[in-house]
Amino acid sequence: MEKGIRERRICQILLGIAFFLCGSLLYISGISAGEEVEFLGEIRAEIVAPVDSVVNSSGEVFVLDRKLAKVFVYSQDGKMKRSFGEQGMRLKQFRVPGAVALTLEGDVIVADTGNNRLQVFNPKGEFLYEMGNGGKAPGEYQQITSVAVDPLGYIYVSDAKNKAITKYTPKGVFLETMELNYIPDDLAFDKQQNLYVLARREGKIVKYPPKKGKPEELSLKNSMTNYLTDTAGIAVDFRGDIYLVEWKNNSIVKIDQMEQVLFSFGSQGVGKGQFNMPGSISCDTDGNIFVADTLNGRVQFFKITGSTKKALKAIPFMLPIVDYDSSIYTGKMIVDLNAVPGRGLYALSDYYAQILLVGDTKLIFGKTDEETYKLSNPQALFVNREGRMLIADTGHHRLQFMRPDGTFDYQFGKKGKDRSKFLALSGVAMDDEGYIFVADSKNNRIQVFNNDGIYLKTFGKESGGVYAHGPQPGTFSEPKDLAFNSRQELYVLDYKNKRIQVFDHKGLFLKEIGGAKDTIKFQDPIDIALDDRDYLYVADRGAHAVKIFDPTEQLVMQFGSVGNGRSHFPSLSSVTWAEGKIYVADYKVDEVKVFTFDPTVSQEEERVYFTRTSKPLNMQNASEEIKEAMARKLTIEQAKKELAEKIHVSAEELDAALRVEAEKVVQNGQLQITMSLPVKMVPVGVDITDKK
């Protein structure tokens, strides 16, 4: 009898195991419309608690281990090749690292969450640079949750406590911060540069189009289960489908852009396709997925097959307008820069009262024991093509001339308010004819001299009183820096009035930038420069950024922040330009940072985006392709008709300017089309974003 009981018990156990295996196999097959999952392999060697992984173009897998504070690099067959990182707070050390990503050049970005920064390494694990530090200001972090790289190479970083996403250029130059009204948990991009932000607490994914169009929310509102509230990470494949890591059920869920659940697999356990608190997910270019199976101490990778959906069309690659180039060591306390083609970079230090020339060799000018020529608190420098230097010897209230070899040539001026006298002169420039213009700061005027220093004229006076529309044109409150454009118009940095005034060659006022009526405002403008295309560069110390304006005074972009890194500007002091490169000095930083700048790489004009949805079509016998083509044609034609009435333009103008940006089929089978027009075509006050 006992034998029979034992046999029945064994049968029950075997049936239970069989049922469990079948259940696992069924679950790994998932909910699908023809899609299947295939286990490809796993990585275990030496890792303990993997939280993120990413694959490079050579097939190497980079795995970030939070507990060991290391990045492990594996070959395609799972063999460990190298590792880097360790616990700590210094560079090349990590505290509670949370995410890893790769730049388009293959460099490794580690979200060093516990140290409130990102660290960047080359593929060999050699340290390159850091980005950010603790704090709430732009470029600073309190809790980094994710890092992602878009198809053009721009780097995006999410911060939970600051509720923000920060954007950097491909080489780590800070560009902007996008403030959010929710907590971002993870980031992902599709091939068309759409940004997907997981907001787990709100149970949604927010999708941001690349050209600052209206964001779209995905919330699985039509699904019986909102998997998003338990999602640890997201990834988007080459078709635009979205993978979710559902940590609570230890599963992977795949959804489409219409919020439909396409496929799911996984369960709790240690077998193939089983997980224990999975942490993140990533996709490679072939559509394979990699899952950081955190508490199981491994990374699993799978191949998903069976989808008939077409791949998204990739956006054209475009170089960034501005990016980091190099650094030049000059020491701290630099107040002015001049870059002269064929000669090098001239850097003026007020503290050391000397000029450093960095060219083929490094030379120092201005050091002398002769009291007659000693500089005192110099604030400005101008160098012509031949290398002749003009120095605003501010502490001595005079202008000094130096020969190209650094020997003293001539000087004039002394303290006072009369002609040829100065009170804390702080800017100097020379026009194409050799006339010298001096910003006589405390006297609130511009004095003009010929090439020999002979006085010619003065213009400007002190701004007085309070005016509803700001200080009067042609008046100054401590003019600080000067520069000429290609038309020989003089730009004057009116420092305490926080504006730039432009004058013709005779000193007649033409216009202002950053004035009371201007939408552009400066916080603490400290220096200006112009290039050969008449782009204007403003070093705004208060904003910790360099602001770039086109020849029509439109703000093109700005870069820089108070956060650590390649565009770390805690106390900006000077900016200059030469041969396509921007040179930036910060008084507290011992290197001049050099940036490439080419506005011609992107001629994209600002556009306004709007969406229209097709009406239901009674075409029962037509194919889906014909229905879609007809819906597209009718929707665009109706949009053109509506726009022609709203903005009063001809059909020909609309045909030339209207652009279809995106299309998608919504749940009822209708076609939703996103279109755009140049902002300049839409009259002020006219709303075309929604159909009335």
Image: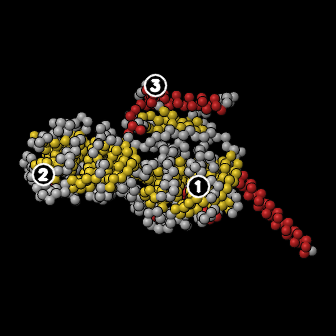
Q: Amino acid at mark 3?
A: Ala
Q: Farthest residue to the right: give it.
A: 1
Residue at mark 2: 398
Q: Position of residue 511 (x, y in %)?
A: 23, 39
Relative image position of residue 618 (x, y in whole percent): 64, 30
Q: Is residue 621 above or below residue 596?
A: above
Spatial separation of the CA atoms under disc 1 and disc 2: 63 Å
Q: Residue at x 16, y 39 (%)?
A: 435
Mark 1: give few (<14), some (14-19) or many (20+) Cα within 10 Å: many
Q: Earlier in the sequence, mark 2 or mark 3?
A: 2
Dot 2 alpha-carbon crowd within 10 angstroms: few under 14, some 14 to 19, many 20 or more? many
- Please give the residue where the numbered disc 1 appears in the rendered image: 61
Q: Which mark is residue 610?
A: none
Residue at the image position 34 percent from the left and 42 percent from the top:
580
**Rendering coords of residue 389 (x, y %):** 19, 47
Q: SS class of the residue under badge 3?
A: helix
Mark 3 — residue? 651
Name the quadrant containing residue 298.
Answer: bottom right
Tell me the distance, in whole angstroms, between the alpha carbons under discs 3 and 1.
Answer: 53 Å
Residue 370 versus residue 215: which sits nearer the camera?
370
Of the numbered discs 1 and 2, the one sitting upstream in the chain is 1
In the image, residue 621 sits, relative to residue 501, either above or below, namely above
> Which of 34/632 is in front?
34
Residue 480, percent from left and from top: 20, 49
Residue at far left of view: 418
